[in-house]
Image (cartoon, rainbow, N blue to C red):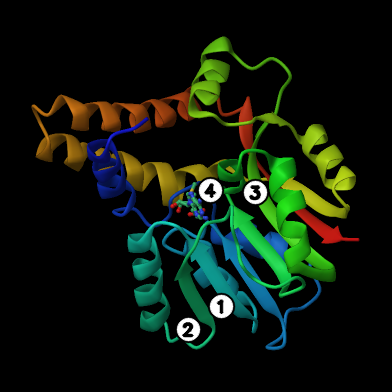
Amino acid sequence: MLSDKFWNYFFEIYEAIPRQGPGDRESTERALGLLPRLTSHHRILDIGCGSGAQTIDLARATAAQIVAVDNHEAFVTQLVKRAADQGLEARIQAQVGDMNDLAFPDGSFDVIWCEGAIVIIIGFAKGLSTWRRLLVPGGHMVVSELCWLRDDPPAEVKAFFEAEGADVTDMDARRKDIVENGYRLVGDFVLPAVGWWENYYVPLGATLERFRATHAGDQEALDVAARSQFEIDIYRRYPEHFGYGFFVMRRL
Ligand SMILES: C[S@@+](CC[C@H](N)C(=O)[O-])C[C@H]1O[C@@H](n2cnc3c(N)ncnc32)[C@H](O)[C@@H]1O
């Protein structure tokens, strides 16, 4: 059980960066390119939206109405501000909510979008099956999730993700989950390395440097920073072993 102090430090770091997981506008748009054109009649649900980097990209690239949900209020507040700053507030409704308990009626959305957050519901397959009812028949789900890219992950990397509670499989196992949970796979690709560095690990690294200086001498704070730093270092050393698979699927 992690302490309140841990979470305060954790959010101090992650509220200071432009997105809370790997991703980039080009990949969001590439995945969108596999869907039918989204007009003002379509509704997107963005689950685990964080401070909304991909929400803003979705709003700019489509004419759809977007509901964005995250359980951390400060991220939702950041997204509300970002949307207002860009004149997108009429199309983005950001709200605090729990992905384990989304109280929308069946068939509420044409598209469900979830970048880097399905791991939280504990199980890629569980996310696909739990959220399926929220889609109209024939609606689409787009998910990016951690995958092994080779079949010989180093023990150190495996141990790190296991300790984080991440359910990492290869791309084929994800494709199988998609078919077994009532979807057709439309397409998939691997997030390029630039999506890990430019908007995520580069700003995270700079934030960690400032955070360590601010909290010098506070071991609990330094431990929180060390955990995030280790994540950066492990990707720097082993980028060929793991990545984010972007999966676009259609509800059957
Ligand atoms: C890895 S981040 C991804 C954020 C964003 N999609 C991105 O790519 O920048 C995961 C997000 O899930 C949110 N989250 C964690 N538990 C949640 C829950 N039970 N319900 C909704 N959101 C949750 C976190 O606050 C965080 O913003």
Dot 4 amino acid type: Gly
Q: Is mark 3 within 8 Å of ligand 1?
A: yes
Say whether residue 58 is left or right of residue 10: right
Residue pointed to by mark 2: 88
Between discs 3 and 2, the one toward the N terminus: 2
Quick one: SS at disc 3?
strand
Q: Nearer the viewer, mark 2 or mark 1?
A: 2
Q: Nearer the viewer, mark 1 or mark 3?
A: 3
Instruction: Categorize mark 2 by other alpha carbons within 10 Å: few (<14), some (14-19), many (20+).
Output: some
Residue depicted at 25% across the width and 48% down the height: 12
Quick one: SS at disc 2?
loop
Residue pointed to by mark 4: 195
Residue 33 is at least partly visible in this image: no
Between discs 2 and 1, the one toward the N terminus: 1
Q: Quadrant of the N terminus?
A: top left
Label 4, label 1: how many angstroms apart (C-alpha)? Answer: 19 Å
Instruction: Categorize mark 1 by other alpha carbons within 10 Å: few (<14), some (14-19), many (20+).
Output: some
Residue pointed to by mark 3: 144
Label 2, label 1: how many angstroms apart (C-alpha)? Answer: 8 Å
Dot 1 amino acid type: Arg
Report how many numbered discs are placed on residues in the image.
4
Between discs 4 and 2, the one toward the N terminus: 2
Dots 2 and 1: beta carbons under 8 Å?
yes
Dot 3 amino acid type: Ser
Res. 73 mark: none
Say whether residue 206 is left or right of residue 64: left
Task: Give coordinates of residue 242: x percent, y percent.
Answer: 62, 30
